[in-house]
Amino acid sequence: MSGGAGAEAGQGARLTKASWYALVLVSSSQAISLLDRQILSILAPSIRADLKIGDAELGLLYGTVFALFYALFSLPLGRLVDGWVRTRLLGICLAAWSACAGLAAFAGGFGLLAISRLGVGVGEAAAQPAANSIIFDTFPRSKRGTAMAAMGIATALGLGLSMTLGGVVASWWDHRYPAGSAPGGFSGWQFAFLVAAIPGFILSLLILRLKEPVRGGVDGIPTPADPAPFKASGAVLAAVTPGANWFSLWSRRASASQWLFNIASLLVIFAVCYGMTRFTQSYSPRPPVKALGLEIDAHVMQWFVVGFGLFVIVNLFQSFKLTDKPAYHVIVSPSILLLMVVGGLQTSINYGVMGFTPSFLVREFHLSLAATALQFGLLSAAIGIVGPIIAGPLSDWLTARMGGKGRIWLTLFSLGVSPLFGIWTYSADSAGAFYLRFTLYSIILTAWMPPVYSLIYDLVLPRMRGIASSTYIIVSTLLGLGMGPYFVGIVSDHNGGDLGQAIMSVNIVSPVIVIVLLVLLLRINRDESTVISRARKGGEAV
């Protein structure tokens, strides 16, 4: 924590074997999270052919359907992270989302596959808030860049493993059991979902046995136990869920101006999403998706989810102001909000790229599913490890010399340069040239995560890290996972399946990212130094 005794306490904390063991387990939960989330991308060609759906529908399954419930439930679960036993919560949720991932094996149409993705989204909503909170109560500030690098490495391993395991297992199954002869009638992609679900159950048992760290102990700001964490979590869910939020406003005696702001925000969101629905319907017409006996327009579903998420964010910030003024004054600060925008926009690029690159390799270079899985999956894992290994310690080194500005400069380099390497990569004329270029592109592209994540969680008090993480999740999920894959999908469908051009078109947000980072350079150190004073302004006793 910058700007106080807590920071000094954090700098001197010792790391033990138990600290590193905890880091390995919670990082592994992130790897499993990415495995179950991303496996859809490598299996997409088989699912597309089997279920007779287009790239826009795959974008919905991969991004939008998952994103809605992941973002919504990250808020009450994030609040539960701040008050309950984090190791227990993470272990339970890990087992739950693994079961939902395995449910996809029984999908014979869009409906059950969408329900599976919904369940994975709800379960994984606790993963990042719980993991980050545990790490920041285990590692001192001087080592948090390195700790977050471990999370970045786990993300890369999860991405690579999802492609390698998913593609190889699916291809092996289909080769061993030709159509119609497989036990249980499973296709290769269905069997791959079953296999991917298994590691999560084993890891959940190990995490449940992990010792819970002292909340705020490393920063010298011990936090009293929460007397009613589940009640508080339920209150957050009620406060942010559209419809229920009005009862929450009424019960808290919100002022007329707060009611007016809420209703006006809803009307503006509805108008924007209605306009975008009409535009995308004309830009990339798609036949209705059949699900649960209904015919649903993919674009209507997409913009309903976006509108839902935007209204949840409005409700969240209003809830902060009414129920937790210290959190409102700390989290709703320029630096944190701008960092969340940067993370969200860059996540839209990352998910747009990674969600459709396996399909791009299959279509553009005529690679088999197994070859794509092995080559791209292993390369993504190996190179995705290198970026955080470099960026984590470099972030700590720059922070020691420049404060938060050092982390911003590293992020600015990574996100300012990477689009140029992306365009160069996806214009390759052979698979070999693509892999060579992607190696450099990936190293640069992954360097932003340790500095941005470290900054966000250093800019809040220890008791706020769960809900701050959840706030970041809903912003980054809405902008990233909810928009990136969908955007690539509709551009691809509009351009007749040109995935290379569609993937690179998502970099249209890069200039905005650079501008926001330049603004952050001007104020990050100021906001770092006022965390405790802003919390006290809201009534926090620190």
Image (cartoon, rainbow, N blue to C red):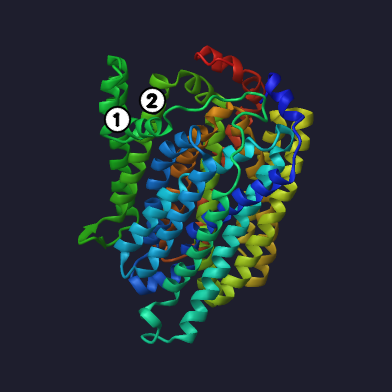
Q: Could you tell me residue 283's position as x and y percent?
A: 34, 54
Quarter of the rendering containing residue 370: bottom right
| Quadrant of the image containing the N terminus | top right
Residue 63 circle label:
none
Q: Is residue 280 left or right of residue 528?
A: left
323 vs 175, nearest the viewer? 323
Dot 2 falls on a residue whose secondary structure is helix
Dot 1 falls on a residue whose secondary structure is helix
Amino acid type assigned to the residue bearing label 1 in the image? Asn
| Quadrant of the image containing the C terminus | top right
409 vs 8, nearest the viewer? 8
Q: Does residue 504 appear in this view?
A: no
Residue 319 circle label:
2
Q: Could you tell me residue 379's position as x and y percent?
A: 66, 65
In the rendered image, the residue lying farthest to the left is 293
Mark 2 vs 1: CB contact within 8 A: yes
Q: Which residue is mark 1?
A: 245
Q: Could you tell me residue 397's position as x and y percent?
A: 78, 36
- At 63% across and 71% down in the image, what residue appears? 375
- At 58% across and 64% down in the image, what residue appears? 161
213 vs 164, nearest the viewer? 213
Amino acid type assigned to the residue bearing label 2 in the image? Ser
Q: Could you tell me residue 327's position as x and y percent?
A: 49, 23
Sequence-first disc among 2 and 1 = 1
Q: Does residue 116 appear in this view?
A: yes
Q: Is residue 459 left or right of residue 395?
A: left
